[in-house]
């Protein structure tokens, strides 16, 4: 049984959530508060396994309430938000302060109870660990892949004359639930001296990825921005895949460029697999790939393609992953060269980029 508490100043939303949660076996609504202060006053009595928290509340407000939850009663928190210009940055900030996931109220209308119920229950089970990998249209990969670990010989990689054999030309990173602070940690550890572009897919809907990029750009000694179509990928710059679009990288004869597209169809858009597959095709062994915390197995097949091409492949280990789904799938596929704690990955990438790995 998952015990859930709700904090939202809207009585309509509290009633709607109560109706959704009360109709689901295995979920118990233990309390509904109209303010952050009321929620905090009742945490000891309600003892929730997860909290659904609105950020735009009078009084203490959502972010200070989240801070208090994390220090006094650490609990998985799902944020209720909108992708408005005001709410999106607050939601991204909440993810960096400890919230595990969020639901966009503008994407899932409170009138359409079935759609909201589905996404909310899925996230509650994910963040509380009450459910395994998320369902998908393809079976989870199993490895090792036949080609992995074999000598691949000399590959005809576009742009091979741009540097010495084995020189890394791009870093690609994929993440889902729990990803924003993990991505920030790796980029911070890489530092401003990184000499290659970094392309990032974080599972996040349209309207939030720009706020995510702006937040990273403000806090890190790197240039971070939401990727645009057909722009050159510059050294020392981080490109965040826009929500609702796939980010791919291509070699056009003069250098690496980004390409945005809505195809192929995929469970997630942006998709880590799509980015990783494009990196394998564009630079092959000259890529370094990192797969971080998240549900499901997006990224495992793309990482297998990179491993086949001789790229360096890294995954976050189980102990430091919020949810060990995506990294585990890549490990099971035989696609991971090194499984490392989050705090080690940035330094390891520095070694590889410096030619010491």
Image: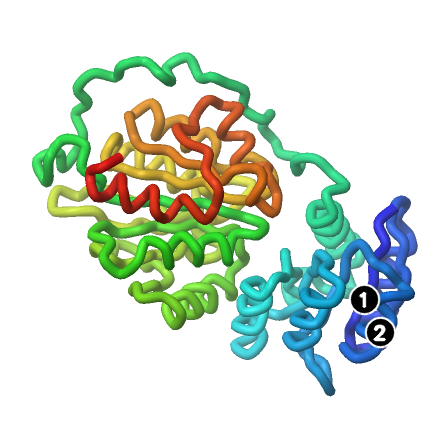
Residue at label 2?
A: 33
What residue is drawn where x is 89% and y is 63%?
46
Q: Tag on residue 6?
A: 1
Q: Is residue 223 above or below residue 165?
A: below
Residue toward you, 61 or 254: 61
Residue 243 or residue 79, whichever sits in front: 79
Rendered residue at 74%/54% (across/down): 120
Q: Which residue is drawn at the image coordinates 55% and 34% (left, top)?
A: 297
Residue at image position (26%, 44%) is 170
Q: Is residue 37 left or right of residue 127?
A: right
CB under 8 Å between callouts 2 and 1?
A: yes
Q: Is residue 148 left or right of residue 105?
A: left
Q: Which type of secondary structure does the marked residue at label 1 adopt? A: strand
Quadrant housing the C terminus: top left
For numbered disc 2, what is the local secondary structure? strand
Q: Is residue 233 visible?
A: no
The spot of residue 69 in percent (x, y) is 72, 67
Q: Residue extending furthest left?
A: 161
Dot 2 surroundings within 10 Å: few (below 14), some, or many (20 or more)? many
Give the mark nearest the N terminus, 2 or 1.
1
Q: Position of residue 138 (x, y in %)?
A: 58, 28
Q: How many marks?
A: 2
Residues 281 and 151: in front is 151
> Residue 70's spot in the image, x, y percent?
68, 65
């Amino acid at each position: 049984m998952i015990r859930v508490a709700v904090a939202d100043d809207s009585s309509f939303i509290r009633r709607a959530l109560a109706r959704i949660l009360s109709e689901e076996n295995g979920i118990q609504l233990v309390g509904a508060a109209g303010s952050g202060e009321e929620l905090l006053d009742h945490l000891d009595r309600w003892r929730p396994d997860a909290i659904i928290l609105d950020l735009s509340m009078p009084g203490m407000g959502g972010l200070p309430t989240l801070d208090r939850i994390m220090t006094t009663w650490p609990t998985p928190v799902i944020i209720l938000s909108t992708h408005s210009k005001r709410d999106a940055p607050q939601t991204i900030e909440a993810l960096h302060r400890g919230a595990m996931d969020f639901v966009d109220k503008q994407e899932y209308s409170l009138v359409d109870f079935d759609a909201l119920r589905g996404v909310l229950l899925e996230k509650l089970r994910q963040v509380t660990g009450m459910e395994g990998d998320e369902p998908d249209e393809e079976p989870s990969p199993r490895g090792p892949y036949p080609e992995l670990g074999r000598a691949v010989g000399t590959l005809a990689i576009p742009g091979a004359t741009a540097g010495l054999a084995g020189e890394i030309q791009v870093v690609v990173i994929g993440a889902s639930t729990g990803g924003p602070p993990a991505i920030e940690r790796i980029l911070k550890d890489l530092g401003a001296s990184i000499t290659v572009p970094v392309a990032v897919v974080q599972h996040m809907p349209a309207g939030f990825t720009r706020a995510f990029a702006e937040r990273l750009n403000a806090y890190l000694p790197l240039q971070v921005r939401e990727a645009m179509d057909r722009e050159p990928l510059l050294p020392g710059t981080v490109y965040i895949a826009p929500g609702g679009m796939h980010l791919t990288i291509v070699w056009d004869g003069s250098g690496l460029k980004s390409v945005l597209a809505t195809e192929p169809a995929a469970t997630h858009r942006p998709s880590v697999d799509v980015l990783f597959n494009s990196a394998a095709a564009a630079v092959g062994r000259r890529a370094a790939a990192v797969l971080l915390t998240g549900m499901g197995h997006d990224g495992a097949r793309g990482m297998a393609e990179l491993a086949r091409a001789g790229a360096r492949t890294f995954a976050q280990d189980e102990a430091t992953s919020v949810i060990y789904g995506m990294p585990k799938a890549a490990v099971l596929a035989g696609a991971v060269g090194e499984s490392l704690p989050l705090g080690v990955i940035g330094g390891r990438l520095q070694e590889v980029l410096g030619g010491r790995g």
